[in-house]
Image: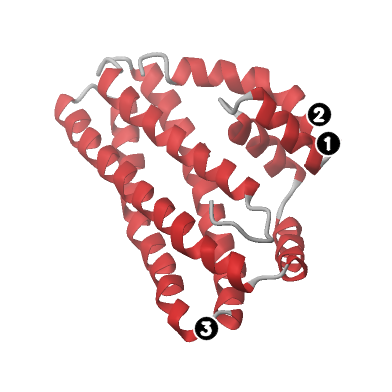
Amino acid sequence: APEGPIDMKMMFLIHHAFRRDLDAFAAAVRGTPVDDRRTWRLLADRWQVFAEALHEHHTTEDDLIWPELRRLAPPEDLATLEAMEAEHGEIDPLLASCAAGLRRLAQRADEDARAALAVRMSATRESLRRHLAHEEGDAIAIIQRVVTPEDWAVIEQAIDRRGSLRGALRLVPWIAHEVPRDVLDRVFAEVGGPFRLMWVLTRGGFARREAAAFQHA
């Protein structure tokens, strides 16, 4: 991660969750029996969790983070910020096509649909990986150069105002899944006890749903 005054730990944890999910979905699409409609339904439902989290993440960046950076950054950095938004637009149709493929397989066994979905899922994974690497290497470097901790606190307050308890209960176990316990302990120590409590209350159910949806991954 680019060095600087802003703590980007949560950004990188969320990016980890996106990469983790797409690796799991790519493996599940290849491994799930084409006639196992129950598992395909679980995968289609689980895809919504991933897609909604990614949509919220990108919307937050487009509405709150990139506009502030455009205000603070020198002209030579603007092309990177424009690319961030353009890449969001490229990813959205891929997400929709994967959702459609999962819904189709949840309805009926279709080997051709599975083959097409495997290709789309791989393309989505590669597109998002390129975008995340671009963001981590270039956009976050801009944040570290031009944003002060005081500026970032204002952005975080605006992000927090968009959140809800229901959303937090959905996202906390999703973000924490497969993150090493020592890392989680450091994060919980920094962000406060309520998040640890949410994780304790939700992790068991989340883990059971993960095991069912990705049993063939």
Between residue 126 and residue 168, name the one nearer to us. 126
Which residue is at a point 63% across and 31% down the rendered structure image?
176
Q: Looking at the image, is mark 3 or mark 1 earlier in the sequence?
A: 3
Which residue is at a point 19% across and 32% down the rendered structure image?
113
Mark 2 lies on a secondary structure that is: helix
Between residue 182 and residue 51, name the one nearer to us. 182
Mark 1 lies on a secondary structure that is: helix
Q: Which residue is mark 3?
A: 74
Q: Looking at the image, is mark 2 or mark 3 earlier in the sequence?
A: 3
Whether label 3 touches label 1, CB < 8 Å: no
Tell which tag, 2 or 3, sits nearer the viewer. Answer: 3
Amino acid on which the number 1 mark rests in the picture = Pro
Mark pair 3, 1: CA separation:
39 Å
Q: Which residue is mark 2?
A: 197
Q: Which residue is mark 1?
A: 194
Dot 2, how many residues are within 10 Å of its Cα: few (below 14), some (14-19), or many (20+)?
some
Q: Residue furthest bottom?
A: 75
Locate residue 143 relative to residue 108 in the image: left or right: right
